[in-house]
Amino acid sequence: MNVATVKRRITVYDNVKPIISGATNKTIRLNSSFNPRTSVTASDNIDGNLTSKITVSGTVNTKKKGTYTLKYTVTDNSKNVTTVTRKITIDSTKPVISGAKNITIRYKSSFNPKTGVTAKDNLDGSLTSQIKVTGAVNTKKKGSYTLTYTVTDKSQNTTVVKRMITVK
């Protein structure tokens, strides 16, 4: 009986990079707490969960408005490396006041300076209830009056709008 034995060495190379998830660009409030690792994970086709091996470079100062860059890097056991860059923006967008247009009203008519005026913010949503109005309109005296509308969001971004009310 003829028998042959062959020994072979088979080497399997892992060339698939790990995947980093959750490191998306984000806008956060001034003075808020921020942990760059929250919701960021890493996984690999061979090594599985690599979240604990993620390194983060860069810092975010939540007390100072601006845009900060963070770099997330993870390496699997086969030395495949993935790097992801993420931008964190500390909110500098002012709220928007709408409806504070110059108008003319009738002498001795009723007038509420907040009627029809709204404020909205990119992060805080409606700020209408927080609008402050300075100035006064005397509907029993013809003339022009200036009202100032001010609103500030939680990131200390302030919008000021002036409005002319004419009583005729």
Image (cartoon, rainbow, N blue to C red):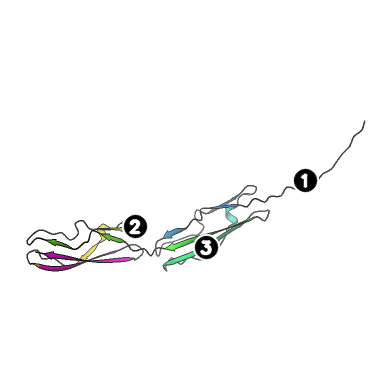
Q: Where is residue 130 drawn, in percent x and y? A: 26, 60
Location of mark 3 (residue): 70
Q: Where is residue 161 drawn, in percent x and y? A: 25, 66
Vertical comparison of 10 with 60: above or below: above
Q: CA distance from mark 3 to mark 1?
A: 40 Å
Segment tinted magenta in the rendering = 143-168
Asked whether residue 5 is drawn in magenta, I would say no
Location of mark 2 (residue): 124
Residue appearing at x 71%, y 50% in the figure: 13
Horizontal side of 161 relative to 89 (left or right) equals left
Query: Which image quarter holds the N terminus?
Result: top right
Location of mark 1 (residue): 10
Q: Quadrant of the rendered structure where residue 92 is?
A: bottom left
Which amino acid type is marked by label 3?
Leu
Q: Nearer the viewer, residue 53 or 18?
A: 18
Q: Main secondary structure of the magenta part?
A: strand
Which amino acid type is marked by label 1?
Ile
Which amino acid type is marked by label 2?
Asp
Q: CA distance from mark 2 to mark 3?
A: 25 Å
Q: Where is residue 139 drawn, in percent x and y? A: 9, 63
